[in-house]
Image (spheres, grey):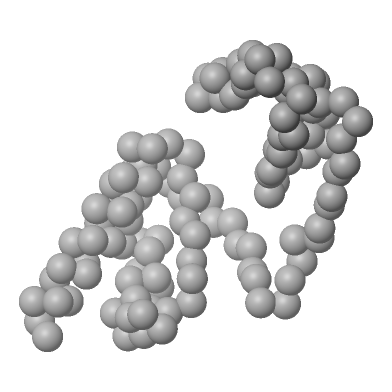
Amino acid sequence: MAAFRESYGKLYELRSLASDIPAIALTATATHLTRDTIVNILHMEHFVEIKESPNKTNLRYVVHCMDKKAEHEEYFVWLADTLRKERQNSVRTIVYCQTINYISSVASFMLQLVVCWERTI
């Protein structure tokens, strides 16, 4: 299990203190192995699993692998242009990064663009 999930692995301790209280575990991207791990770690017995297909007509899932040394502008110019043109009417976009530091860097880059645009209005 990844280091940041270590504390999740100890959630069963809370469940042991209040085993009669219902619990819920939610995930959007877990593999079968990960779901089994969650069930085992949380000591979930007699649970109901609800699966919903992620295939929705109004959602799109796209993966772009990015060179860590590349400039943000190389990869996010499309998003920056969309935000500049559409503003609040832009389609909702989720950017996933592997580390908190990297997403912080991307967010700072996007914020700088927004501030620059606001000054030109």
- Residue occupying the far left of the picture: 119
Q: Is residue 15 left or right of residue 47?
A: left
Q: Vertical placement of 110 versus 82: above or below?
A: above
**Residue 112 visible in rendering:** yes
Q: Position of residue 39 (x, y in %)?
A: 79, 27
Q: Quadrant of the N terminus?
A: top right
For image coordinates 25% across by 56% down, the residue present is 109
110 lies above or below 16: below
In this rendering, would 30 be left or right of 45? Answer: left
Q: Position of residue 97 (x, y in %)?
A: 46, 45
Residue 2 appears in the figure: no
Across and down, in percent, residue 90 comes to 42, 79
Q: Residue at 84% x, 50% y: name it.
A: 50
In the picture, which quadrant includes the C terminus?
bottom left
- Nearer-the-camera pick, 103 or 43: 43
In the rendered view, tell whether residue 88 sits above or below residue 30: below
Q: Is residue 68 left or right of residue 46?
A: left
- Image coordinates of residue 70 in percent, x first then y, are 34, 50
Q: Nearer the viewer, residue 23 or 71?
A: 23
Query: Which residue is located at x 68 percent, y 44 percent?
Result: 27
Q: Nearer the viewer, residue 102 or 89?
A: 89
Residue at image location 86% in from the left, 43% down from the top: 49
Label tally: 0
- Decide which of 68, 102 is in the foreground and name it: 102
- Along the horizontal axis of the image, is 32 left or right of 95? right
